Image (tube, rainbow, N blue to C red):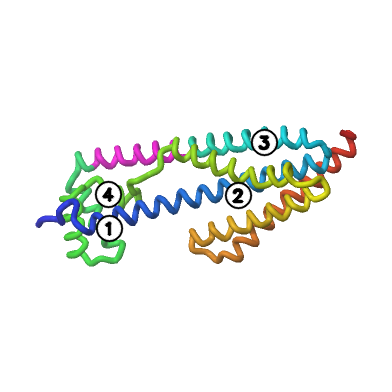
Amino acid sequence: MTGPRPGSGRDGADGKQRRLGSLLNRLRAAVLGANDGIVSMAGLVVGVAGATPHRGALLIAGVAGTMAGALSMAAGEYVSVSTQRDTERAALARERWELATDPAGELEELVGLYRARGLEERLAREVARALTARDALRAHAEVELGLTPYRVSPWQAAGSSLFAFALGALVPLSAMLLSPDAWRLTITVVAVLAATGVLGAVSARLGGAVPARAALRSMVGGAFAMLVTYLVGTLLGTMTAL
Ligand SMILES: [Zn+2]
């Protein structure tokens, strides 16, 4: 029994689909990062604006907050992706060892997994044999562990969340700093609600959910953050008389 040759048409379509899935995941992560940047920075600048009318204070708080938030997002993403990669590597190493020491048992395991997915015995065995002949480790990685190649590197993940957060943070920061005094709060609130709404809808569309509901949810989150920090900022501003 011979399996399909490597590099056949099916292989190519498979790879394309996986790369597309990985791209979608990265886009979704970027949208979430940008949304994080918008909401946290909106809270920060609105809170500072509630406490003090000084533009210098807003600029300092905004820049420091953007850097702190972006770096913290990047560090978190780096750690999370590295940990996931290490976990996957350990699982693959164990799988490789099992394949080397007990190939017959591993073939039976694969047959069992395909039977559990609904294939009848004969077909399950045929599929398991063909995939084992082609690339046993890959077959086990995909079917048993649910792993796919084309993963993002930790540095890539860290870099894109840093960039996404900073880009998002620019929305409330620039709205607050560039608007005329009398309008800056209103303009910032409108800009933040619009941006979070759009990002919420985009992220829902990427995930196949209802865009309108996600947009609303996202806007409520932004509005809530601004309301709370504005109240706290105003309170602190009155107490400390900055
Ligand atoms: Zn296995």
Q: Earlier in the sequence, mark 4 or mark 1?
A: 1
* Pick the front one: 72 or 123: 72
- Residue bearing mark 4: 140
Q: Amino acid at mark 2?
A: Asn
The residues colored magenta run: 80-98
Circle 3/circle 2 CB separation < 8 Å: no
Check mark 1 vs ligand 1: CB closer than 8 Å? yes or no.
Answer: no
On the image, the x and y values in percent for residue 91 come to 34, 41
For numbered disc 4, what is the local secondary structure? helix
Answer left or right for 100 relative to 182.
left
Determine crowd level at label 4: few under 14, some 14-19, many 20+ residues with C-alpha closer than 10 A: many
Q: Is residue 93 magenta?
A: yes
Task: Give the crowd class for mark 1: few <14, some 14-19, many >=20 residues within 10 Å.
Answer: few
Dot placed on the residue nearer the N-terminal end, 3 or 4: 3
**Chain-order first, disc 4 or disc 2:** 2
- Marks 3 and 4, how far apart in space? 45 Å
